[in-house]
Amino acid sequence: TKEAIAELNRLVAGVDAMGAPGALAVKIAALSDVAVIAIHTRDFATAEQALDAMALDIELAGLGVEVLERLARIDQLAIDQQALVETDAVRKWFPADVPVE
């Protein structure tokens, strides 16, 4: 999973140089995947970095506050989902010794 995150980050870093159409969409998709993987593996610092990078790319592209607000809601949903996963009811069905990766 760290390898997947590293590969996605390399894609984000190099997509502008590729001259591919829709570079912003590629970056957003890759950073979104980074955030999902990072949240799944409980690497919240990496998830936050990915979401911040998405917000910056969107802001630099001039897509407006509405998109940034949607990202903030998605971020909050991810936090809420993580809190749900860490409940006693979930722990009952998924013991701690089951690997996350």
Image (cartoon, rainbow, N blue to C red):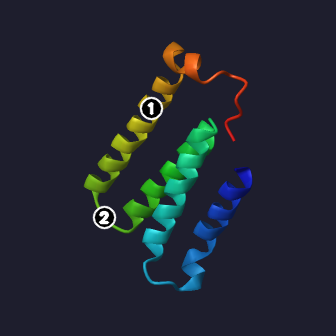
Q: Residue at x 53, y 86 (%)?
A: 19
Pick the front one: 70 or 63: 70
Q: What amino acid does circle 2 point to?
A: Leu
Task: Please report whichever mark, 2 or 1, sits nearer to the chain's N-terminal start.
Answer: 2
Q: Residue at x 49, y 70 (%)?
A: 26
Give the x, y percent position of residue 92. Answer: 57, 16
Which class describes the residues within 10 Å of circle 1: few (<14), some (14-19), or many (20+)? few
Q: Quadrant of residue 42?
A: top right
**Residue 45 visible within the image:** yes
> Which residue type carries mark 1?
Gln
Between disc 2 and disc 1, the foreground one is 1
Residue 81 is marked as: 1
Res. 99 mark: none
Q: Secondary structure at mark 2?
A: loop
Residue pointed to by mark 2: 63
Name the residue: 49% across, 49% down: 51
Residue drawn 54% across the image and 62% down it: 30
